[in-house]
Image (cartoon, grey):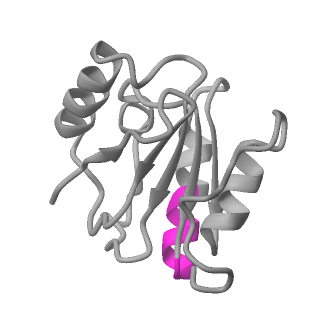
Amino acid sequence: MAFVADTTYAPQLLVFRGLTEWPSLSEQVAVYGRLTGEGFLNINTFALLDFRQAVVPTPTGPDAPTVMAGGPRRRAYVVNTPEQRDFITAMQERAPRAFELQAFGSEADAVAWLFAKRQAFPVTFLDQPGAR
């Protein structure tokens, strides 16, 4: 699996698409470390992660280190299934207080939530309305 970020809008926003499984802790640490070192990820960076094609991990759910892993503190996950949504909810429950995670059915809703507390973000990277 490739856990690769689109850095077009970094450091404001990192976009991860085409995720088919949950990345391992070591993979997350490596990717987030590289993004931080290259100036694409900082304490104010948000993330949009498309998990619509992802298989939900083991029934025990995520642990706190997997949630933190050095990544963005405010993350919007685009999901398709109730199981994926439940997994994101479990992640939020285990996450440290500084982390905000939320599941959405569309990229547009996810981006709106990410930037609700800030000036609107240009969402030109989204497909045509209704396509996502």
| Left or right position of 8 against 104 | left
- Quarter containing the N terminus: bottom left
Q: Nearer the viewer, residue 60 or 12?
A: 12
Location of residue 108 (image quadrant) = bottom right
User: Residue visible at 65% across and 23% down?
Assistant: 98
Residue 20 image position (x, y, % from top left):
27, 69
Location of residue 82 (image quadrant) = bottom right
Is residue 25 depicted above or below 123 in this figure? Answer: above
User: Residue visible at 35% across and 18% down?
Assistant: 36
Q: Nearer the viewer, residue 113 or 85?
A: 113
Is residue 61 depicted above or below 57 in this figure? Answer: above
Is residue 77 depicted above or below 114 in this figure? Answer: below
Residue 33 image position (x, y, % from top left):
27, 21
Residue 114 image position (x, y, % from top left):
70, 45
Question: Which range of residues does the magenta coloring cover?
Answer: 80-88
Q: Would residue 72 be counted in the magenta stretch?
A: no
Q: Nearer the viewer, residue 64 or 36?
A: 36
Is residue 74 depicted above or below 42 in this figure? Answer: below
Residue 61 image position (x, y, % from top left):
41, 56
User: Residue visible at 17% across and 34% down?
Assistant: 26
| Left or right position of 121 against 131 | right
Q: Nearer the viewer, residue 119 or 23?
A: 119
Location of residue 75 (image quadrant) = top right
| Left or right position of 22 against 61 | left
- Quarter containing the C terminus: bottom right
